[in-house]
Image: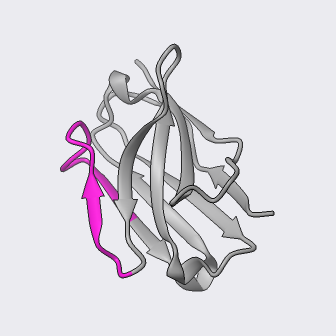
Amino acid sequence: QVQLVESGGGLVQPGGSLRLSCVVSRIIFSRVHMGWYRQAPGEQRGSVAIITSGGGTSYADSVKGRFTISRDNAKNTVYLQMNSLKPEDTAVYYCNGIPNLGSWGQGTQVTVSS
């Protein structure tokens, strides 16, 4: 079974930065498109950023210019660099493959608050 382990979340003040990591095991990572998703309390999980196997990227309008997705195939890891964080970025962040790899990790909590 695929395993996804997210980390790097925390409490940060508005305007601050965080870097999230997601290690994926038991797949041929380099061949898989990957995405970051987030779910705020009372809301559905939604896509934040996508990176293709070839390195192409796309972003939700709400994070364009502030977030950067990247990947290190040698480490089976996808990253999300988050800058200029806003309170509305508060959520649990998850990674997964595209299409979905069949399971979700535990996520990592990001809280943006003064």
Q: Quadrant of residue 61?
A: top left
Q: Please name the predominant secondary structure of the magenta segment in the image.
A: loop
- Residue 110 in the image: above or below residue 35: above
Q: What stretch of residues is rendered in magenta? A: 54-69
- Depth check: give the residue in front, 45 or 108: 45
The picture places residue 62, in percent across and down from the top left corner, at 23, 36
Compared across the picture, whether 7 is left or right of 58 comes to right
The picture places residue 98, in percent across and down from the top left corner, at 48, 61
* Residue most extreme to the top: 42
Is there any visible trace of residue 108 in the rendered image? yes
Residue found 26% across the figure and 58% down from its top: 58
Quarter containing the N terminus: bottom right
Residue found 40% across the figure and 28% down from its top: 13
Compared across the picture, whether 1 is left or right of 98 comes to right
Q: Quadrant of residue 69?
A: bottom left
Residue found 35% across the figure and 38% down from its top: 16
- Residue 41 in the image: above or below residue 17: above
- Residue 69 in the image: above or below residue 10: below
Asked if residue 62 lies in the magenta stretch, the reply is yes
Q: Quadrant of residue 53?
A: bottom left
The picture places residue 75, in percent across and down from the top left corner, at 62, 79
Is there any visible trace of residue 11 in the rendered image? no
- Depth check: give the residue in front, 10 or 78: 78
Compared across the picture, whether 31 is left or right of 80 comes to right
